[in-house]
Image (cartoon, rainbow, N blue to C red):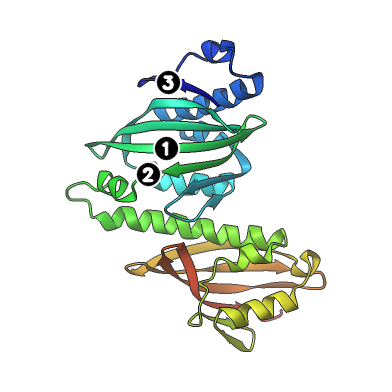
Amino acid sequence: MKFMHKKWLLLPLFLVGCTASVSTEDADKLAVANEVIDAWNNMDWDRAWDTFAEDGVLHSVMSDPVVGKDAVSTRLSAVVDGLTRIELQIINMGIINDVVVLERVDDFDYKGKHSRVPVVGIMEISDGKVNEWREYYDKATLVEALTVEGDEASSFTNRTASSDINALTKKLSADWNKGDMAAYLAAYRRDDDIAVLFRDKILAGFDELEQLFTSTWTTEEAMGDFETHDVVVQLVGPGLAISKGQFEHQFPDEKVVGVFSHTWQQTDAGWKIIHEHTSRAMPE
């Protein structure tokens, strides 16, 4: 274990690099972590998002992971909107089992309100980019910090829910396009009450959905590639949202375009699809 104690400030990079117990590879990882912290402290969001790998993952462990640099940018942009100052105050930072561990307090001003939120972060870093950043904090403390007098708590909830669902919609296509059917189906609530309207069928329950999908598209080639666009998310009640948009799906022998809608429910495991309806466009 290589660990360094820090009190409210970062060690100069030259000291990190010269620490005898820190390898060159570990020093490089710490330098990337320092770059992330500096970008946040200077509210340089373009630089902050660019520290992620193209397929980088942000996982606030109280919600589903956000996959891909663009999705991470969308998710975090909703969170940082309203910040006027932030300082990631590092208490301890070091390398444990090849990952960067950051114990810190996020000290920030949000719409004129000053707050401090304790956080532990874990960064997996390689080739100068963050592959995965896991964050552990008390969600209620963060929500309270981002709720100010005259600003409804639902405003923050709505923005983060919309960002989360947009990111999950992008993850659906990413999982499908790499042939990972198990990851794709994990977006659906696993019980008998979900419903999927597919072509001329109504699939009732997760087992029926899983059986049809796994037996129909048995290879990555057969699954083809699909993308969604113009996705709009609307919260319709506590823990309940509807998303709708357009899709294009290129199969080996045909291209299908159309529209879709998802009904999402917030569960202990994050947002899950409980109802889906897809409709193909009429052939020209």
| Labels 2, 3: front one | 3
Which residue bears the numbered disc 3?
A: 5
Which residue bears the numbered disc 1?
A: 120
Which quadrant of the figure contains the C terminus?
A: bottom right
Q: Amino acid at mark 2?
A: Tyr
SS for dot 3: strand
Q: Is residue 4 above or below residue 157?
A: above
In the image, what residue occupies the spot 66% across and 67% down? 248
Query: Whole-percent x and y of residue 29?
Result: 59, 27
Q: As drawn, is 106 to the left or to the right of 22?
A: left
Tags 2 and 1 touching, CB below 8 Å: yes
Distance of label 2 from label 3 (alpha carbons): 20 Å
The outermost residue toward the front is 1
Query: Whole-percent x and y of residue 148?
Result: 21, 46
Question: Which of marks 3 and 2 precedes in the sequence?
Answer: 3
Residue 60 in view (yes/no) = yes
Which residue bears the numbered disc 2?
A: 137
190 or 238: which is nearer to us?
A: 190
Q: As drawn, is 41 to the left or to the right of 98?
A: left
Residue 42 in view (yes/no) = no
Distance of label 3 from label 1 (alpha carbons): 14 Å
Query: Whole-percent x and y of residue 84?
Result: 31, 33
